[in-house]
């Protein structure tokens, strides 16, 4: 059953999925994923919201719940939370409110990563400039989520420089078998490097995908290969049995020229 009204704050729960760094087998961050009281997905959580004001209140409650849960679990890695452009009238006001809540929850705001989904409504330049100023003032990191499949990615990059680009799982899925896909990944990685952005690959489900992404130079990865999202606790990470350093083809696999 889908909710017919905005969920109360107490009904929201958080699932965490790790973002790993294969170079030292560490957890770089955990992405916080909104869940309903019985584990319903984020789409169910948002289904009862009727307008931007309700969406904004719910979006804020989701971030507060994520910080409270992360603090209770003594999270040491970064916490990656979503910031939906269409739910907030003023980015800096939203962020400042979140940072106030971080103080209340005793969560170190410098551990926060704000993810802006590429598929969201593109912010006006004035709002982006507002966001940039707040980002620089507080020093937290920003990321563009689902990069490469929506209409907004390059436009967002032209307006501000995020710290992180999260490469959409479509590229992850095609990487092992599509030379053109690998060419696109290399070019996006080169662009990100030149702009001073880190790259994280999303949706990594197989050892094969992880190996080719690592060979291409993307060593921060997220996906079911390492862990499914886990409700209200920090998941144990499954580490691949082998890791190929960037630029060194794995035996019997792909060279960097394909």
Image (tube, rainbow, N blue to C red):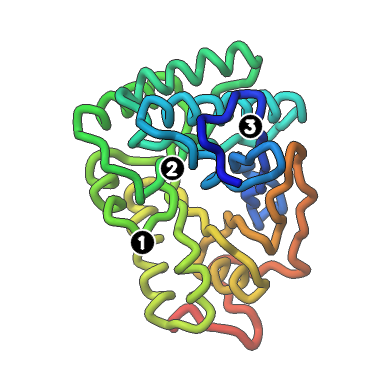
Q: Which mark is residue 95?
A: none
Label 1 with label 3: CB-CB less than 8 Å:
no
Q: Secondary structure at mark 2?
A: strand
Q: Secondary structure at mark 3?
A: loop
Label 1 with label 2: CB-CB less than 8 Å:
no
Q: Nearer the viewer, residue 219 or 124?
A: 124
- Label 1: which residue? 149
The residue that appears at 27% across and 32% down in the rendered structure is 128
Horizontal arrangement in the rendering, residue 127 relative to residue 74 (left or right): left
Quarter of the image holding residue 16?
top right
Q: Which mark is residue 143?
A: 2
Label 2 with label 3: CB-CB less than 8 Å:
no
Q: Position of residue 205 (x, y in %)?
A: 64, 67
The residue that appears at 69% across and 67% down in the rendered structure is 243
Q: Position of residue 17 (x, y in %)?
A: 66, 48
Q: Residue furthest left?
A: 125
Quarter of the image holding residue 7?
top right
Tell me the quarter of the image containing the C terminus.
bottom left
Camera-side mark, 1 or 2: 1
Camera-side mark, 1 or 3: 3
């Amino acid at each position: 059953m889908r909710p017919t009204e905005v969920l109360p704050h107490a009904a929201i729960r958080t699932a965490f999925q790790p973002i790993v760094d294969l170079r030292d087998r560490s957890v770089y961050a955990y992405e916080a994923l909104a869940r309903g009281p019985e584990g319903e997905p984020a789409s169910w959580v948002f289904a009862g919201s009727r307008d931007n004001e309700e969406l904004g209140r719910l979006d804020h409650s989701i971030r507060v719940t994520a910080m409270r849960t992360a603090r209770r679990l003594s999270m040491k890695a970064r916490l990656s939370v979503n910031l939906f452009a269409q739910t907030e009238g003023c980015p800096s006001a939203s962020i400042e409110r979140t940072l106030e809540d971080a103080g209340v929850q005793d969560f170190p705001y410098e551990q926060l990563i704000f993810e802006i989904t590429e598929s969201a409504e593109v912010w006006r330049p004035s709002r982006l400039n507002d966001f940039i100023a707040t980002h620089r003032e507080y020093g937290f990191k920003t990321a563009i989520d689902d990069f490469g499949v929506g209409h907004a990615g390059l436009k967002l990059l032209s307006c501000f420089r995020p710290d992180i680009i999260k490469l959409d799982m479509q590229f992850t899925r095609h990487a092992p078998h599509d030379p053109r896909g690998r060419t696109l990944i290399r070019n996006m990685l080169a662009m990100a490097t030149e702009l001073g952005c880190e790259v994280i690959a999303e949706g990594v489900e197989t050892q094969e995908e992880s190996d080719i992404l690592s060979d291409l130079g993307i060593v921060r990865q997220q996906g079911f290969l390492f862990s499914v999202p886990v409700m209200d606790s920090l998941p144990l990470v499954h580490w691949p049995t082998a890791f190929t350093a960037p630029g060194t083809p794995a035996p019997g696999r792909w060279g960097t020229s394909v």
